[in-house]
């Protein structure tokens, strides 16, 4: 031990002498190693370098999570031989706080996978989870168990979360309960709750966290979604039963959204990149609706890096597509040292002041403000942002003290990084209802979180809305392709299976050859809306020019021009996030989805089919999964003839009759060049050929027929060199679609089609 102290003193002396000679010194590497894990360095052992310890899942670094190489070439905190740095098993807060009941087994500490059961004393009733498991994020599964009895209290017993203490056992109107956390735990949520006249407690249920505790993406989805969901449109009171608020997406909503992403050295580049990706996903999700929020997006460290100015957004000088491109292209590799957290809040305050001047006091009253900041809370310049946040509140609340403006400002903190300064960050949050502070470790799943946080009740019928998941699990397919429908026909021992697309709550679009010749009662549609999975057909509508034998005199045995039909269902489908319509060409709603000002079919077609090689998709049903997506390229313009010529030889088609058989109403895909396309299989007929445009799905064609039968049983199959598929171009059959779907005297709400 004495030698170690002597060597440290000698090393410091030598370093001081070397510094006078202009030689840089590094932080020492002794005692940095960790039992059961490893560490990474942001900048080797040089000054300003951040050391981060890493442990396997279910464990956390102890006693330090990170260390910083300081200007005096020493680590903060200083590593010691005793206690040694090691990986500890994740611990959950002590559940032995249950009133009027027993917790078993009784233990001094509870670790990952430990299970507890709860039993109430005689005369008391259990609410919450009777069994809980300690999870790998340091939380207990389920909900807080509470033993209570009918005591005539106005509010129910709010319980005590694990690891906490509560002061207050009176639950009448205006009675208050206060919470603190025991030991080295800290409180997230409401430390004080008041019993309201509606029988509900104010605020949200508190929880006690260790430094190693994190919120799961599912928890963030529920809490963040329930907190922010009123922000886009409603200006009335949001005092609902649970104090929850949602992003309610309306067709006419506006909102000012300020986003700050911390890119300082204390946060790893991986965290920064994933935060940026989450921001891209958030603004993409909101943009998929017919709303126009204004954005101020800024990266910050010791300086600000403005991605978009909210004033430019308000003046129409900034486009969302350009903002996403700037976000994706921003290089976070070369970052300044130091962090000025106050600087980003000052930026937001300044922009709010400019908006107030531009809008005027009366119009400013109608503005809603949402501030979202990704940071670890570490700052070494600029001072605390708390005073600036107080000014932001005063500005948004218009200095009213009665709380009537609380719903007009939400400040959310996403605490990211390896060493989070919770005590500094939690007071910065603002807003009524739900949680506004989240400790996030699994940033990769935040994209799914932002998809789930939207309450789409007001616009769930908007065409083309869907979820986008990188992990294509079977249970997610219904949300990814909510318009997909499966069609079955059965008569006299003859059956067919095809696909179709939901275009209104009452109509399925498919290929005419899938249902032609069948009575409506022999046609069923599978589309699971949670009510009835199998829907019966009421009426079948075919394009009036569809006639499979129309070109027999030219030797063309089967002619599939105008191969399009609509199935009217006996009962409307129940529109939800799982089942909703796809957009089709030349409707006003599709114009809004494409953000087009020019209201013409030609504008939509030029935008969706503008390239001579246009990437499109359609679906196939497989044996082991619900559906899979196929990728193809439409050969248009100069590429079209090279594609359609492979129909020669099919059903009597010759070089002379090729253009008679493959009319301009068909889009051609398939082949190996310049890309290897997928090919349609038996059963894919009638399915939507679509294109995704900024989170909305637009159907441009439907699968009709192919030059070769490459596959019979569905599945993702690749094209051969001479196999081609031919799809009915919906832009060519708009008159038929309008005649049925736009008809005013039917018993359904008609679609609004463009005049030209």
Image (tube, grey):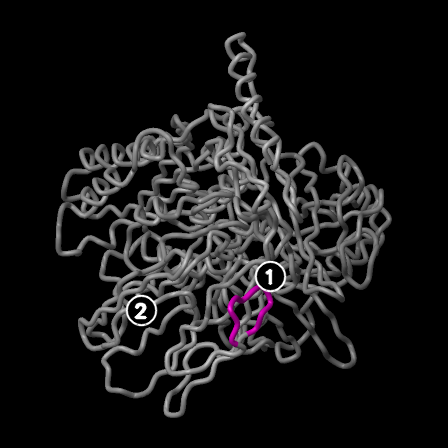
Return the x and y of residue 69 as percentages of the image width and height: 51, 29
Q: Quadrant of the C terminus?
A: top left
Residue appearing at x 68%, y 54% in the figure? 629
Main SS of the magenta part reads loop
Return the x and y of residue 72 as percentages of the image width and height: 47, 23
Mark 1 lies on a secondary structure that is helix
**Which one is nearer the viewer's eye here, 461 or 451?**
451
Can residue 443 be seen?
Answer: yes
| 681 horizontally vs 348: left or right | right
Viewer-nearest of discs 1 and 2: 2
Q: Earlier in the sequence, mark 1 or mark 2?
A: 2
Residue appearing at x 14%, y 41% in the figure? 361
Residue appearing at x 57%, y 21% in the figure? 10
Q: Is residue 574 magenta?
A: no
- Mark 1 residue crowding within 10 angstroms, few (<14) / some (14–19) / many (20+): some
Q: Are marks 1 and 2 in contact (CB under 8 Å)?
A: no
Quickly name the residue at label 2: 166
Mark 2 lies on a secondary structure that is strand
Above or below, comparing residue 666 to residue 309 in the picture? below
Q: Range of the magenta residues?
A: 106-115
Q: Quadrant of the N terminus?
A: top right
Return the x and y of residue 85 as percentages of the image width and height: 59, 45
| 597 horizontally vs 644: left or right | left
**Which one is nearer the viewer's eye here, 274 or 359?**
274
Residue appearing at x 62%, y 33% in the figure? 30
Return the x and y of residue 135 as percentages of the image width and height: 55, 64
Q: CA distance from mark 1 to mark 2?
A: 41 Å
Q: Which mark is residue 476?
A: 1
């Amino acid at each position: 031990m004495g030698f170690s102290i002597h060597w440290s003193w000698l090393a410091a002396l030598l370093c001081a002498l070397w510094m006078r000679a202009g030689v840089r010194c590094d932080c020492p590497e002794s005692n940095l190693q960790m039992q059961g894990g490893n560490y990474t360095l942001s900048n080797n052992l040089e000054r300003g370098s951040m050391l981060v310890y890493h442990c396997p899942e279910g464990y956390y670094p102890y006693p330090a999570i990170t260390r910083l190489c300081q200007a005096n070439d020493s680590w903060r905190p200083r590593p010691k031989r005793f206690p040694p740095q090691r990986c500890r098993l994740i611990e959950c807060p002590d559940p032995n706080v249950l009133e009027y009941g027993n917790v078993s087994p009784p233990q001094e500490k509870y670790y990952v996978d430990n299970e507890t059961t709860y039993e109430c004393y005689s005369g008391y009733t259990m609410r919450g989870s009777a069994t809980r498991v300690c999870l790998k994020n340091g939380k207990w599964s389920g909900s807080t168990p509470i033993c209570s009895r009918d005591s005539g209290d106005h509010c129910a017993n709010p319980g005590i979360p694990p690891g906490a203490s509560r002061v207050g056992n009176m639950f009448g109107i205006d009675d208050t309960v206060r919470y603190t956390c025991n030991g080295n735990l800290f409180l997230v949520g409401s430390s004080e709750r008041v019993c309201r006249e509606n029988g509900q407690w104010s605020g949200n249920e508190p929880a006690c966290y260790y430094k190693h505790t994190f919120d799961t993406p599912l928890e963030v989805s529920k809490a963040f979604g329930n907190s922010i969901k009123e922000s886009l449109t409603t200006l009335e009171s949001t005092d609902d039963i649970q104090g929850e608020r949602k992003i309610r997406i309306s067709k006419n909503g506006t909102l000012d959204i300020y986003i700050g992403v911390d890119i300082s050295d204390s946060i790893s580049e991986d965290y920064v990149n994933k935060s940026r990706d989450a921001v891209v996903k958030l603004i993409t999700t909101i943009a998929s609706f017919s709303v126009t929020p204004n954005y101020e997006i800024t990266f910050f460290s010791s300086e600000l890096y403005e991605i978009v100015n909210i004033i430019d957004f308000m003046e129409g000088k900034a486009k969302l597509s350009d903002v996403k491109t700037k976000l994706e292209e921003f290089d976070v590799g070369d970052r300044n040292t130091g962090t000025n957290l106050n600087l980003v809040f000052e930026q937001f305050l300044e922009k709010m002041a400019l908006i107030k001047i531009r809008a005027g006091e009366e119009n400013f009253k109608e503005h809603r403000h949402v501030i979202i900041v990704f940071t670890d809370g570490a700052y070494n310049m600029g001072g605390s942002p708390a005073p600036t946040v107080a000014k932001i509140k005063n500005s948004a609340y218009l200095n009213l003290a009665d709380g009537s403006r609380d719903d007009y400002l939400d400040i959310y903190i996403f605490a990211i990084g390896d060493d989070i300064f919770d005590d500094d960050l939690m007071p910065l949050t603002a807003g009524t209802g739900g949680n506004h502070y989240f400790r996030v470790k699994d940033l990769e799943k935040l994209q799914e979180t932002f998809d789930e946080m939207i309450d789409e009740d007001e616009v769930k019928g908007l065409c083309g809305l869907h979820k986008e998941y990188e992990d294509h699990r079977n249970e997610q397919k219904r949300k990814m392709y909510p318009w997909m429908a499966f069609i079955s026909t059965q008569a006299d021992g003859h059956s067919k299976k095809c696909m179709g697309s939901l275009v209104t709550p009452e109509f399925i679009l498919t290929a005419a050859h899938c249902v032609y010749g069948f009575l409506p009662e022999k046609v069923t549609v599978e589309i699971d809306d949670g009510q009835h999975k199998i829907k019966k057909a009421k009426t079948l509508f075919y394009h009036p020019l569809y006639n499979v034998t129309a070109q027999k005199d030219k030797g063309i045995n089967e002619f599939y021009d105008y191969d399009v039909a609509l199935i009217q269902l006996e009962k409307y489908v129940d529109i939800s996030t799982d089942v909703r319509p796809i957009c089709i060409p030349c409707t006003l709603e599709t114009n809004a989805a494409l953000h087009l000002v020019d209201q013409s079919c030609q504008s939509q077609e030029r935008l969706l089919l503008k390239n001579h090689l246009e990437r499109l998709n359609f679906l196939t049903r497989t044996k082991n999964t619900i559906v899979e997506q196929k990728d193809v390229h439409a050969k248009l313009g100069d590429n079209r003839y090279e594609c359609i010529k492979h129909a020669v030889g099919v059903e009597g088609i010759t070089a002379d009759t090729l253009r008679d058989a493959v009319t301009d109403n068909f889009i051609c895909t398939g082949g190996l060049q310049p890309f290897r396309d997928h090919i349609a299989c038996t059963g894919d007929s009638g399915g939507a050929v679509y294109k995704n445009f900024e989170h909305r799905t637009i159907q441009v064609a439907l699968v009709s027929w192919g030059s070769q039968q490459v596959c019979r049983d569905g599945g993702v199959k690749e094209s051969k060199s001479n196999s081609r598929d031919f799809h009915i171009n919906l832009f060519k059959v708009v008159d038929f679609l309008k005649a049925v779907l736009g008809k005013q005297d039917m018993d359904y709400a008609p679609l609004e089609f463009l005049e030209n």
